Amino acid sequence: MSTMTLENREKLEAQSLQARRKKRWNNFLHMVGNHSLLIALSAIFIMPLYLVIVLSLMSKGQAETRSLWPHPFVWSNYVTVFTAVPFLKWTLNTLFVALMGTIGTVVSSVPPAYVLSRLQWKGRQTTFIILLSTMMLPGQVTMIPVYIIFSRLHWIPSFLPLIVPSFFSSAFSVFLLRQFFTSIPDEISDAARIDGCSEFKLMMKIIVPLAKPAIMAIALFAFLGSWNDFFGPLLYIVENEDLWTLGIGLNAFQGIHHVDKNMMMTASALFMAPVIIIFFFSQKVFIEGVTLTGVKG
Amino acid sequence: MSQARVIATSPFKKKGEVAPPRKKLKVPRLFIFLCMSPWLFGIVFFTAYPMVSSFYQSFTKFNLIESPQWIGLDNFHRMFFEDDDFWQALKNTIWISVISIPLRIAFAMFTAWVLTKPKRGRNIYRTIFFLPSMVPAVAATMAFTYIFNPAYGPINRMLEAIGIKEPPFWFLDPKWSKWGLILLGLWGIGDTMIIFLAGLLDVPTSLYEAASLEGASAWQSFRYITLPLMTPVIFFSTVTGVIGSFQYFTQAYVASGQVNDYSHSMYFYATHIYYSAFRAYEMGYASALAWVLLVITLLCTLVILKTQKRWVHYPNGSLFK
């Protein structure tokens, strides 16, 4: 009887060892499978960027063949592009508009977001709903009268129509900031108020520093939105070549006959570079920002 | 005052004594008004007035130089019965929404789901997947029209290498150009994917553990746990997808400029508004087009909202609580 149980136990132990091994093997297979899938997907996502860079380093002749590797590497493309087209001017124009737009958005979005989240007042809910619904409003509905206003002011072509509206709050930024402000405990404000802190000081000295990640996020979104914008410049600055931004200039590239296709990729690579660099340094801010607007509606 | 407070919160307070009401905060009205003023100014001059104005203009003939001239419903009559470009634009827009919205949702869900799998290295993959959505639309579109070029673009070369004899002409072929745009959109899935990823990571793991104890297959736990819990995110991206596709402009405009889209295969609703307003300078007609766009998007959103009770599950009550 006792030998039976001993045998049984040995058998059981052997079985469990086998099961554990099998499990470990399965886990390993899972891991290999997951990572191969992820690597394959990564390759697909990277490929267009890789091709842009590779093509940007080819000679004109080679860029119109089907090769996938520059031979020889024409690094001078990155110099030529600045002389072939007014690339530096386009970059500076884009940078100027984007920086001014970012300042405008941050300065004009923090106060409404503060008032909509940290203070109780009659009509707050209604105001917030109006704000949300303007986020959903297609821009085309207001586009034409706004264009007419700017043209009556003789602001077309100039940078003003691209910059001035950002000083009047962006609904998206207010919304994102409000979501973040709401998550800061009320006790902090109460304590400051009891100590006799004014509401303005409370906003600037206590809440704004606490909300730095959210403010960084709206600043980055505003900057990139403006850097990547094509439609605004298409309406307001196309008529004056001195004001062209990178998007407009690059799109007009094809019409400039002495510029070659490989050069176009060089310019595209330079256009993308700042965005990619900014992203690498601040991806946490980005990803948290996108998440904040997306799920906590 | 501070004395009263101390007494009120003291645990030794006498029976029957009522705590004095907490001092009510004075609402700083002037401060609120000043803080809201940039937004108020914006909403009046850049939203409310333009909406009223474009509504009025949609019943007029207006070329920016002469003052608007009332023509009643002529603009709408012309749109529905005389303007072939309107129907072409509408058809293209509906086609691309119907194909690309479900595709985008499925692809975002798939990439996000794959990202939840690895124990190590998730952040690197997430960075790579997210990166393309940051690339400026003009640069991305130019890159795509170039690498998809049938004569010297590398994509078709790769397709030939894997045995596809006659790869499509992509942006040069009216039948395939919209697929080029859809692929361009899928490449930039990153921001949608991040929202899906956050949703997937929010699903309590205990649910999956319980399901696997009950012997549920991977498909079953996806179908009966993940999918229902993801419906709010799917709902959100459907609504924004519909609104977005009626404003789809830059990629289509740049791509059709690169390849000379004579057949108007990449002529969308927003493109039609742009050409009517800023090429033909028919501001009245373009306003009418914009208002029809608003009505269409509102109707679509309402339809999706109406159906949401049937398929959207909110674990903590409604989204708009």
Image (cartoon, rainbow, N blue to C red):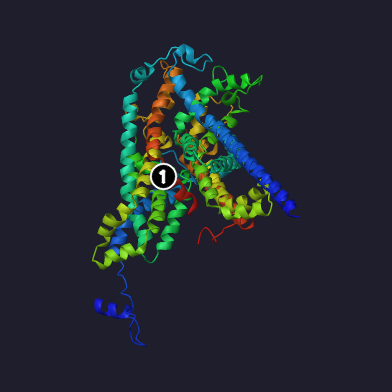
- Residue A247 lies, with reference to residue B48, above or below; the image says above
Residue B254: x, y in percent? 48, 29
Residue B168: x, y in percent? 62, 23
Q: Secondary structure at mark 1?
A: helix
Q: Is residue B239 visible?
A: yes
Q: As rendered, which of A122 and A149 lies closer to the eye?
A: A122
- Residue A123 lies, with reference to residue A148, above or below; the image says below
Callout 1: 10 Å neighbours few (<14), some, many (20+)? many
The residue under the point 34% across, 36% down is: A156
**Subunit that carries the residue with mark 1:** A
Residue A194: x, y in percent? 26, 68
In the drawing, does residue B255 fall left or right of residue A106? Answer: right
Q: Amino acid at mark 1?
A: Pro
**Furthest-left residue in this view:** A196
The residue under the point 50% across, 33% down is: B251
Instruction: Work out which quarter of the rendered image holds the N terminus of chain B and state it.
Output: bottom left
- Residue B154 lies, with reference to residue A275, above or below; the image says above
Which residue lies under the disc numbered 1? A145
Q: As rendered, which of A68 and A171 lies closer to the eye?
A: A68
**Furthest-front residue in this view:** A2
The residue under the point 41% across, 17% down is: A259
Q: As rendered, which of B39 and A19 lies closer to the eye?
A: A19
Q: As rendered, which of A198 and B67 lies closer to the eye?
A: A198
The picture quadrant where one finds residue B11 is bottom left
Q: Is residue B142 visible?
A: no
Residue B38: x, y in percent? 33, 52
- Residue A210 lies, with reference to residue B159, above or below; the image says below
In the drawing, does residue A145 fall left or right of residue B34? Answer: right
